[in-house]
Amino acid sequence: MLHAHANGSNITKGVKWVSGHILKSIKEVSPKNVLQFTIDNASVNILAEKFVRAEYPHIVFGGCVVHDIDLLFEDMKKLAWIGAIFDKCNDIVSFIKNSHQPHTMLMDFFSDGTTLLKARVTQFATNIIMLDRTYHLQHCLKKVVVSEQWTTWVTDLCRPSNTKFKAENIKQAILDETFWNKT
């Protein structure tokens, strides 16, 4: 198995550039040793496939299943009720991870060191991973927001007042059983 990559930073990645790198990789290992190329579904890659297949018709091109699944998840998020779940989960994770005291409470008192994970734009299926991790930590999150430490933090230490407002909204979201049931 050959895993090849090329740094495409600051380069317009057109069909010639992509097909050139694929052809170069094929030649490195000899065309007789190549059975399949796995690519994502970007239009430039589909066009590059045609250039490569013109020279090497025996090579099969397959779409990246992980990329397909990620696209499916992105489409699912466009459904209002699913998008609302992801948005609420992202709000919870962002608030806890970006607020030192609540994050410390979660890590120190109520979990085994497992932390929340933020969704990342460029990595596959991270929204699902974020949702899954948050779901598994829901009991710890609930303990955090009903704890004396949380109340003290919100009452005495939260500055400015919009942080207090956000903290109350996050507490309501975490204690919302309907949200967890949908998750």
Image: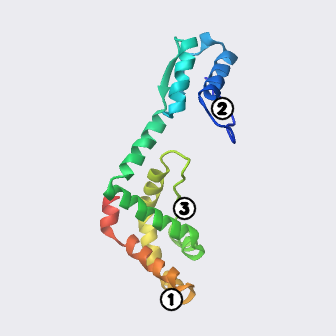
Which dot, 2 or 1, sits closer to the camera? Answer: 2
The image quadrant of residue 6 is: top right
Q: Earlier in the sequence, mark 2 or mark 1?
A: 2
Q: Mark 2 points at which residue?
A: 5
Q: Residue at x 53, y 22 (%)?
A: 49
Q: Which residue is drawn at 47% across and 75% down?
A: 144
Q: Which amino acid does label 2 sit on?
A: His
Residue 168 % position (x, y): 43, 80
Query: Is 50 or 177 nearer to us in this picture?
Result: 50
**Position of 57 relative to 129 (above/below):** above
**Position of 164 relative to 2 (above/below):** below
How far apart marks 2 and 3 lie (CA) works out to 32 Å
Residue 115 % position (x, y): 54, 61
Q: Earlier in the sequence, mark 2 or mark 3?
A: 2
Q: How crowded is mark 2: few (under 14 residues within 10 Å), some or many (20 or more)?
A: few
Left or right of 2 in this view: 63: left
What secondary structure is marked by label 3? loop
**Is residue 30 among the parts visible in the rendering?**
yes
Tag 1 and tag 3, C-beta contact below 8 Å: no
What secondary structure is marked by label 1? helix
Q: What residue type is labelled 1?
A: Thr
Q: Which of marks 1 and 3 is nearer the N terminus?
A: 3
Query: Is 37 or 105 nearer to us in this picture?
Result: 37
**Quadrant of the drawing holding the N terminus:** top right
What secondary structure is marked by label 2? loop
Q: Residues within 10 Å of mark 1 (few under 14, many from 20)?
A: few
Q: Which amino acid does label 3 sit on?
A: Thr
Q: Label for residue 155?
A: 1
Q: Mark 3 points at which residue?
A: 115
**Position of 20 relative to 147 (above/below):** above
**Quadrant of the drawing holding the C terminus:** bottom left
Left or right of 115 in this view: 81: left
